[in-house]
Amino acid sequence: MKIKIRSASVHRKTRETDIQLQFSVDGTGLSKIKTGLPFLDHMLELFSKHGLFDLHVKAKGDLEVDIHHTNEDTGIVLGSALVKALGDKKGIRRYGFWSLPMDETLIRITLDISGRPSLFIHQAEGVSFSRLENYSFHDAMEFMRAFCHHAGINMHIEVVRGKDSHHIIEGVFKCLSKALDYATQIDPRVQGVPSTKGLI
């Protein structure tokens, strides 16, 4: 039986950004990423590697203004590509959870590919952020918010512990990759769409 590879290509062009993206859910962790934001490139490479997703991104944006449009729009396009790649979502596990340590940092992500997008960020008492020159935790959450909204994902991000912004942000991207990998896997026991509504 031939297995269908779930993949999609999306091209989104606005007056602020021009982004081309190819995404494969059933990949091997290969990536080629150029957004003009080196830290985001690194985070997306980690996302691809640890989630075993194949991801190619080529983005041009108005970085002379600031990073906001390129950062957010890349999240939009990745979310759109995930929806397109999953198609009718038949057979997927739908829910994903992962807990990931990185040095002093501990991140937990719980998500539902529900078609009802939302993002909730929980920061435990005692968590602090060190200075990061070109990319902040706020920037990372703006990316995540755009991704969730366009992917139709309800997601909770818990920063349980952490003091280094690099570790916290990297932990979030890695944790997302693992939770999403689990949620998008096909479970042979699931018949049709994993919802009593028959649609997600």
Image: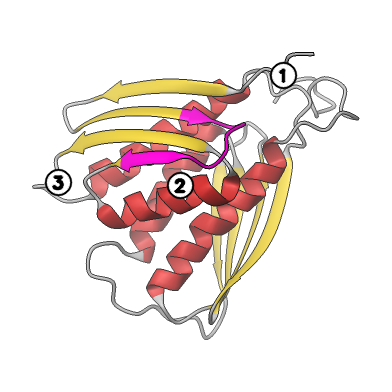
Residue reaching furthest to the bottom: 126
Residue 78 covered by magenta stretch = no
Q: Position of residue 56 (x, y in %)?
A: 39, 34
**49 lies left or right of 178:** left
Eye-nearest disc, 2 or 1: 1
Give the residues drawn in magenta, as a range.
Answer: 23-33
As rendered, which of 162 and 120 lies closer to the eye?
Answer: 162
Please identify the quarter of the rendering in which residue 69 is found: top left
Helix, strand or loop at mark 1: loop
**Whether residue 104 is situated above or below residue 11 in the rendered picture:** below
Rendered location of residue 66, percent (x, y)? 16, 51
Q: Earlier in the sequence, mark 2 or mark 1?
A: 1
Which kind of residue does numbered mark 3 sit on? Leu
Three-letter code for the amino acid on which mark 1 is drawn: Ile
**Residue 145: which numbered mark, if any?**
2
- Residue position for label 3: 63
Which residue occupies the foreground of this view, 3 or 199? 3
Residue that carries the numbered disc 1 in the rendered image: 3
What residue is shown at x 50% (from left), y 45% (from top)?
A: 48
Q: Which element is circle 3 on?
A: loop
Q: What residue sits 57% from the left and 38% below the top?
A: 28
